[in-house]
Image: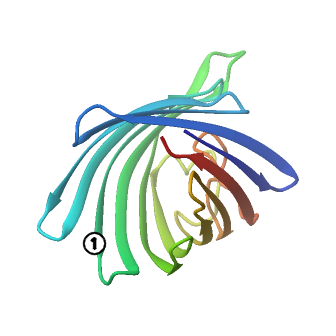
Amino acid sequence: MSTEVSSYNDKLITTVFASTDITEEVNINAELDSTGYLAFGGSYGMMLGSFYTEAYGSYGRSDNVDVYNLGGLIVTQVTESLVIYINTSHQWRKTKGFPILELEIFDNREWKNSLGARYALVPWCDIGYSVGYDKLLSGNEGWKEVENDSITHQDFTVTFKPVWFDTFIRYTTGTHRVRPGEPITKHDSIELGFSKRF
């Protein structure tokens, strides 16, 4: 179970996450944020040699948008202290643009990618960096969220790991979505998170 608070453009969003392992390979999860965005997902992960691989999917919705997401993750431990990962996903967004007229903006598709690393400074503190590249495949023509269909962003994360819980702070700069249910923003964002290990 974890909680995080995101801040951008003078706006605060609180999110609660919960996940559980059904088997050694299968995980299910859910999240709810203060904007009303609710999502459910699942993943299947396994080791392939020295690489951890995971396929995942999720469905989320709020009053304004439905989000379908399918993706994959590869993680490998380079040294005892250094982990690198690559993540890619395809996202379909069904935005309800004009509820009064019962019109919808349909088939907004995004291809989302990130490459990152995490380094353990000491047993109780990690630092992380990732760069993201998102391609807006469709849906940005008539209702432009951004001028360029290719957007990039960077994340800088510090995680503290006392005995029973983890706390992190993440700074994101560049063009990105702070939350799946939010519009794309060019404003930098800060996230503060807390997770309890059971």
Q: Position of residue 41 (x, y in %)?
A: 40, 34
Above or below, 101 relative to 157:
above
Above or below, 188 relative to 77:
above
Q: Position of residue 167 (x, y in %)?
A: 64, 58
Classify 10 Å Cα crowding around label 1: few (below 14), some (14-19), many (20 and above).
Answer: some
The residue that label 1 is drawn on is: 76
Residue type marked 1: Thr
Q: Position of residue 71 (x, y in %)?
A: 32, 50
- The structure's colour scheme is rainbow
Q: Residue at x 62, y 16 (%)?
A: 102
Q: Position of residue 35 (x, y in %)?
A: 72, 32
Which of these two is toward me, 145 or 156? 156
Q: Is residue 52 left or right of residue 186?
A: left
Which of these two is toward me, 53 or 71? 53
Q: Is residue 31 left or right of residue 25?
A: right
Above or below, 32 relative to 116:
above
What secondary structure is found at the residue carrying circle 1?
Answer: strand
Q: Residue at x 49, y 69 (%)?
A: 132
